[in-house]
Amino acid sequence: MKIVIEVCVDSVESAVAAEQGGADRVELCDNLLEGGTTPSAGAIAVARRTLGIALHVMIRPRGGDFCYSAIELEMMRHDIKVAKELGADGVVFGILTPEGDIAEDQTRELLALARPMSVTFHRAFDVARDPYAALDSLIALGVDRILTTGQEPSVLEGMELVADLVRHAQGRIIVMPGSGAERRMGQLVRATGANEFHVVATRSVESPMRFRNDRVFMGGTLRPPEYTRQLTDPEAIRRLRP
């Protein structure tokens, strides 16, 4: 069974590093502190020109919940069109109703707009009310894959549900474990029967800035460090192959 490794990245540099490490695909995002939002058109375009592997693009207008307004849905439509025009191989999105079910009408519309690109329903699945009903809805809609932790903080806690979802899917949709998969890849392969895995594998990189004003921060109270950032580690990706 071929194992497909998708690496979640928030920069073109990390996307390149993921390819160097042997990734099969990257999911390009922005703003991973909030779980990933839509990257810029510039990032998509440069990634597509640079990469020789599959490029999937996050379509998420903001952090927070997955119940979107009419304006946010219009943004998502536009971003899907841009990703397609710039040569993305796939898009990643998820929409729920206020009751926690799959928003089928909106999902169907965005799915049709995205084709022929591949479509992944992201971890909005993990806050759906009923995972089996959600899985059946996505199968009926024709979505290609779901990204899930088994409705737990990480896939290591949700491994049992992931395995059950793989069995329930019966090959009609790809169930892709993520969030923690990089920590126990071999165990997850054996326990779940999945063959696509979503991973994050980074290292800290120091800023080249020699002058540093440590009194000033560019974000809110919860602040990432100003003079280090996370980049994908190619060696860590290589080590993931079972």
Image (tube, grey):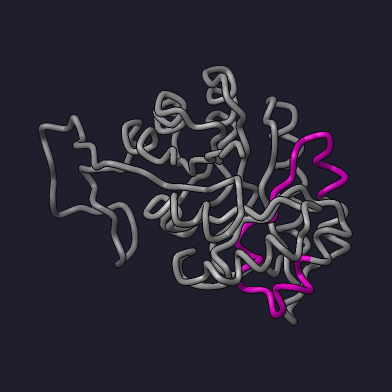
Is residue 56 or residue 164 the one in the foreground?
164
- Which of the 4 image quadrants contains residue 84? top right
Residue 90, percent from left and from top? 70, 37
Residue 88, percent from left and from top? 67, 30
Tag count in the figure?
0
Is residue 20 or residue 43 the one in the foreground?
20
Compared to 184, does 154 lie above or below? below
Residue 114 drawn in magenta: yes
Q: Which residues are magenta?
A: 111-135
Residue 79 visible at all: yes
What's the residue at 83%, 38% (across, down)? 115
Residue 61 visible at all: no
What's the residue at 53%, 60% (across, down)? 191
Compared to 88, does 113 lie above or below? below
**Quadrant location, the N terminus:** top right
What's the residue at 75%, 82% (across, down)? 99
Residue 24 drawn in magenta: no
What's the residue at 49%, 44% (across, down)? 8
| Residue 101 left/right relative to 212 | right
**Quadrant location, the C terminus:** top left
| Residue 140 left/right relative to 163 | right
